[in-house]
Every structure is written in structure tokens, then in C-alpha cells.
Image: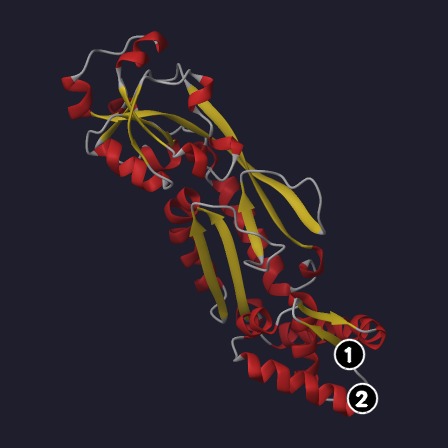
Amino acid sequence: MDWDNLRYFLELSRASKLTVAARRLGVDHTTVSRRVQALEKSMDTQLFLRATTGYSLTEAGRNLLPHAEAMENACSAIVQSKAGQGESLSGQVRIGVTEGYGSTMLAPQLVALTKRYPNLRIDLLAVPRMVQLSRHEADIVITLERPVRGPFIITKLTDYVLKLYASSSYLAQHPSIESREDLSKHNFVSYIEDLMYSKELLYLDEIGQPRHIVLRSTSILAQQQAAAAGAGIAILPSFSADADPCLKRVLGEQIEFTRTFWMLMPIEFKDIARMKATWSFLREMADANQRLLMGRLEVLSNSI
């Protein structure tokens, strides 16, 4: 039996779709189909039921699955015994994450992961929307809301804080802000409410809706850029806004918003070496950057 064919069988059983399995293996979807068909021919049995919604295992496929996984683990152990783990890890991992955290924090951090594992390929899907594991959009997802159900491994990755920020030019041209009540006199930059992808983004509800929202965007990075250009006050993650020299904290430590990032992946990925390594790295980075995530780095010159 050809082990390579079993690798394609395993990925298709986990992905349920040819295109997703092909992406993870770094090949064309026709290659996945051809390899699976070759395995079925060699075993003289059908391993998958094919439908418009995707591929599902037959009884023969379900019987083969634990044996294929055992072979995968054995092969991985053999490779690791002959080479450093960094060299042995290979394949592709797609990480789905919120736009701000993905662009500001993970993008530079993941460079270290690719250096640690040179044969690992990382896709970073940093977008202003929910990335869906159920639709196979990513292998590991970092999200604002904890799923209430699903065949996932779920962990709390980290808390983080958001604060009020505005540019020096805006603050110089508008009434001073000494208390929460003064905020009603000011312009705000915020989300487009009917396009919000999570209830966790309803920050303004916690301080009372301002009278003047002058600019709205689905993108937190666009909001940050608008605030830095002088549009008004924005509620921004401290891990991003504190690094912007054009922005100052408004009301210092008087107002802050705490949110949580949850990390999840399908249960069937828990024993895949590249998934475990990436999962551990993401936790490592979050733990190492707690002061930044909680807005506790020294920013005395960048607040009012």
C-alpha cells in the first residue's frame, strides 16, 4: 500500500472537500482525486461517498481511518528521530483571525514560526469578519466569540483592552475632555452597526451613543487611520493604537474595554504535528505579549 496515497486519504477525510485538502497538501485538487482513486483501486473498495456538499467516509473508510492515522504518527516519529523537528514539520496551516490582531500582532510574529519550521507554509487570513471553521475557511481560528457548540478544541487565548484615542490635532481643535460627560461634544469614528460581525464590537453602547459619528468603517485599521488623521475619537485596541505616534489616549485609564480572543480548531487536527506546533506557537506569543495586549506598556508621553 502506498503511504503517499494514505496521506491524501487522511487530508480528504479531515477536509471533506477536494479543494481544501489540495490546499493543505500544496497540490492541485485533481491530484488528490487521482491519489484517492488509486487507493480505492488498490484496496478494491470505496472509501468515500461523493456528493455536491463534499466527501464523507464510507464504512470501509471509517475502518481505515485509525490505521492511517497510526501510520501517520509512526512516520512522523521516524522523521523526527532522523532530523530536527524544525526540519521535519511540513505542510500548510491556514490561520483565520480578526483583522487588527492578525495584521498588527500575528503578521510579524509568524515570521519566527516560519524560521523555526522552514518547511511549514502559513496562510494568514486577517479579515474584518468571522472566519468559519465549519466551512473549512481555516485550520485554526482566533475569534471574539466562544462557540457554544461544534466538534472543536477551544481555548481562551488572551484578554486584551481597547481605549479611547484621538490625534493631537483633533484634540487641539476641540473642547477639552476631562470626564466621560465631555465625550458627548465630540466626533467619533466607529463601526457600521448593521455590518458588525460580532456583538463584542458594540463598544459605544458602554459609554452611551455619541451624537456625532462622522466616519464609519467595517475595518478597525481604517478606523485607526481615520482617527490618526484627525477625524475624531475612536475606540481602538491598545496593542495597535499605542504604537501609533499620531494618536493619544483620551481620558487615560478612566475608560477601557476588555475583550477576549478565543482560539479553536477541529478536534480531528489535535494530533497533526504542524497544527500542534502552530497552536503552541500562537499561545506562546499571546503569553509573551500580555503587557502589550492589556495596554500596560509605558505610554506616559502618549496620553492625556
In the image shown, does 89 or 267 lie closer to the viewer?
267
Binning the other alpha carbons within 10 Å of mark 2 as few (below 14), some (14 to 19) or many (20 upward) gives few
Vertical side of 208 occupied by 89: above or below: below
Q: Report the amino acid beneath label 1.
A: Leu
Binning the other alpha carbons within 10 Å of mark 1 as few (below 14), some (14 to 19) or many (20 upward) gives many
Q: Secondary structure at mark 2?
A: helix
User: Total marks drawn?
Assistant: 2
Q: Is residue 84 visible?
A: no
Locate residue 137, reporting x and y percent.
Answer: 54, 58
In the image shown, does 270 or 281 lie closer to the viewer?
270
Q: Pointer 1: what residue?
A: 47
Q: Is residue 28 visible?
A: yes
Vertical side of 269 occupied by 199: above or below: above
Q: Quadrant of the C terminus?
A: top left
Vertical side of 244 occupied by 132: above or below: below
Mark 1 to mark 2: distance in Å? 9 Å
Q: How is the image coloured?
A: secondary structure
Question: Looking at the image, is mark 1 or mark 2 nearer the viewer?
Answer: 1
Vertical side of 97 occupied by 230: above or below: above
Q: Pointer 2: what residue?
A: 43
- Residue 179 found in image quarter: top left
Residue at left offset 45%, top offset 63%: 114
Q: Report the amino acid beneath label 2.
A: Met
Q: Quadrant of the N terminus?
A: bottom right
- Residue 186 found in image quarter: top left
Locate residue 6, reporting x and y percent.
Answer: 70, 80
Q: Secondary structure at mark 1?
A: loop
Residue at left offset 18%, top offset 23%: 170
Locate residue 226, reporting x and y percent.
Answer: 25, 35
Residue at left offset 47%, top offset 28%: 202
Mark 1 vs 2: CB contact within 8 A: yes
